Image (spheres, helix red, strand yellow):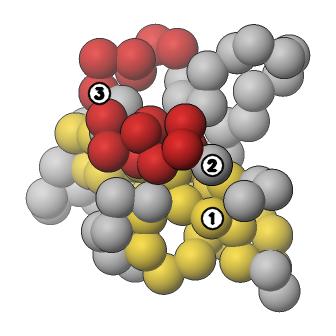
Amino acid sequence: MATIVVLFEVEPGWAPGAEPAVLLVHAAGADPDAPEDPQGRTLCGRDTAPMEHAHYRPTRPGEPWYPATLADRRCRECEGALRRQ
């Protein structure tokens, strides 16, 4: 997979425009027709529709796929899928 989209799984009842209460950080493949959009499922198999786009991309080699401030909330299943690729 060439490109991933980082997504936030947010607390139910979150209102757009407010700071999201991030439960987990997931990764999904980028849609080949719209690279800024995720495919329908995360790498761990969850539906991406209710998730919030993180608009995060590492800026340097060696940086993690997730925002470093949310390291404790990264999805271990998504991370495992990324390592297997």
Q: Quadrant of residue 12?
A: bottom left
Q: CA distance from mark 2 to mark 3?
A: 21 Å
Residue type at tag 2: Gln
Q: Residue at x 29, y 27 (%)?
A: 73
Which numbered disc, 2 or 3, marks the residue that appears first in the sequence?
3
Q: Secondary structure at mark 2?
A: loop
Q: Single out the mark in the foreground, 1 or 2.
A: 2
| Disc 2 residue crowd, few under 14, some 14–19, many 20+, Cα 10 Å | few
Q: CA distance from mark 3 to mark 1?
A: 19 Å
State the image coordinates of residue 85 (x, y, percent, origin top left): 63, 49
| Disc 3 residue crowd, few under 14, some 14–19, many 20+, Cα 10 Å | some
Q: Is residue 23 above or below residue 46?
A: above
Residue type at tag 1: Gly
Q: Single out the mark in the foreground, 2 or 3.
A: 2
State the image coordinates of residue 72 (x, y, percent, origin top left): 29, 17
Q: CA distance from mark 1 to mark 2?
A: 12 Å
Q: Is residue 28 above or below residue 83?
A: below
Judging depth in this view, the residue of 26 and 12 nearest the camera is 26
Judging depth in this view, the residue of 26 and 52 nearest the camera is 26
Q: Which residue is mark 1?
A: 29
